[in-house]
Image (spheres, helix red, strand yellow):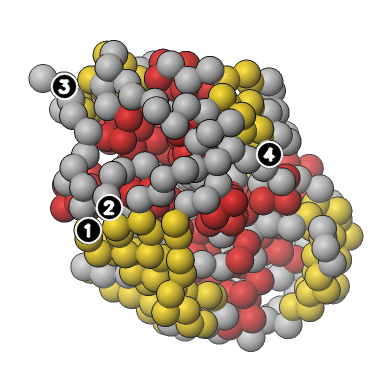
Amino acid sequence: MNKKIFKISKKIKPFKKKIFVESDKSLSIRWVLFSSMSSGKSVALNLLKSEDVLSAIDCIKKLGSKVKFHNNKCEIIGCGLNYNIKNNLILNSGNSGTLGRLLLGLLINSNKKIKLIGDRSLSKRDFSRVTIPLKKFGAKFSSNSKLPLYIKGLKNPKPINYFEKKGSAQVKTSLIMAALKTKGLSKIKAKKSRTHTEIMLKNLKVPIKIRKTKNYDYILINGVKKISPLSYNIPGDISSSAFFLVLTILSKNSELLIKNVNINPSRTGIIKILKRMRANIRIINKKIYKGESVGDILVKSSNNLKSINCPTKYNTSAIDEFLVIFLVAAKSKGISYFKNLSELNHKESPRLYWGSKILNLMGVKNIVTNDSIKIYGNPNLKIKRKIHIKNYLKDHRIFMMSVIAGLTFGGSWKINDQDSIKTSFPSFLKILRKIC
């Protein structure tokens, strides 16, 4: 039997449980990279132990940082803003687009040529969104758009003015990291996206000024001479929580409490969308931890779900969760419409296409374009057929979406490549078994 194929033959039974999900991947990668730039020892508890984060640790060790990672505690002794780069250095960002794009900003002041590589999936993804603006600092690249590529920075990169139009937190963070290494003021106008970097910089006492408007943030950031270390207790990931939110919503007579989740407003689009669809969700025990909003999410089975014409203002704050939102739309009364989602096709796989394909296999009518999907919901949807999810690039969210679909709608499922969850959520199946 192929152990990489996950099989489902029956729907999940009613449950009432309390769980913790694994730590926030965005925060974990950012903490690792900023700690490597710091002067001193940073300590994190509950650092996510996924392949993406381990790739980040491997990269900073090659750049000269010292790392101890045992159980749930990680210590990093940074080497400051100027890495001691060796000749012929190769950095492997694995499957992580976040890591690959952020590393390029981090390396802006290296005057030695460095090779950046990734796995098969990452090597198909677009890097021009960071290489083009990073050239403005003075960096040179062997390729604009695809890995593998070489970067050669310069000892004194120049500050820039830039308009980030995609709403990509990865691009914004890469530019901020590069700006920190200049001798001057960089000005970045950025479409709304995740704010973890700005919040973390304020905790690091980095002088960053942000003026917020309805659609854009105006960021002013000066170069610095050093960065202080940061100790951090990393909360749970709302993107990982999303699968269990939808599992509960679509299950009968069930209730779930997910403890200590990062509910940063730039990440809670899924909750806003699902509430509009009449999902039974509440956030309780809210608190602020080092600038980040943290809370427990209480979710219950939800009857009488309704369709949604999804406001595009939620797109960036729910971009990693749309696949499971599509499952809720499949069970809702009416036709749901989601648009301006071309960014989904720039992830680990073309997710908008795959979301549509899985809905088709489930018998759910949908119409997909290159940036939108219309889903014809069926509140009485029950699957009685055999479904085999195969032949996709390594994509953890496709795998987990398929598992949730099988457990809530029925049918006999064979889902390829369960090892894909190691990139972001290694304990997904372990937690699932506790609920089942």
**Residue that badge 2 annotates:** 254
Q: Amino acid at mark 4?
A: Asn
Q: Dot 3: within a 10 Å radius of its alpha carbon, few (fewer than 14), some, or many (20 or more) residues?
A: few
Mark count: 4
Left or right, 253 with respect to 120, comes to left
Q: Earlier in the sequence, mark 3 or mark 1?
A: 3
Q: Earlier in the sequence, mark 3 or mark 2?
A: 3
- In the rendered image, residue 316, in percent from the top left (x then y), is placed at 66, 50
- Secondary structure of residue under mark 1: strand
Q: Is residue 290 above or below residue 257?
A: below
Q: Amino acid at mark 2?
A: Ser
Q: Is residue 424 above or below residue 192?
A: above
**Residue that badge 3 annotates:** 2
- Secondary structure of residue under mark 4: loop
- Secondary structure of residue under mark 2: loop
Look at discs 3 and 1 and give the one toward the viewer: 1
Q: Earlier in the sequence, mark 3 or mark 4?
A: 3
Q: Amino acid at mark 3?
A: Asn
**Residue that badge 1 annotates:** 16
Q: CA distance from mark 4 to mark 1?
A: 31 Å
Q: Amino acid at mark 1?
A: Lys
Q: Earlier in the sequence, mark 4 or mark 1?
A: 1
Left or right, 250 with respect to 239, comes to left
**Residue that badge 4 annotates:** 309
- In the rendered image, residue 42, in percent from the top left (x then y), is placed at 43, 79
Residue beneath the point at 33% across and 24% down? 382
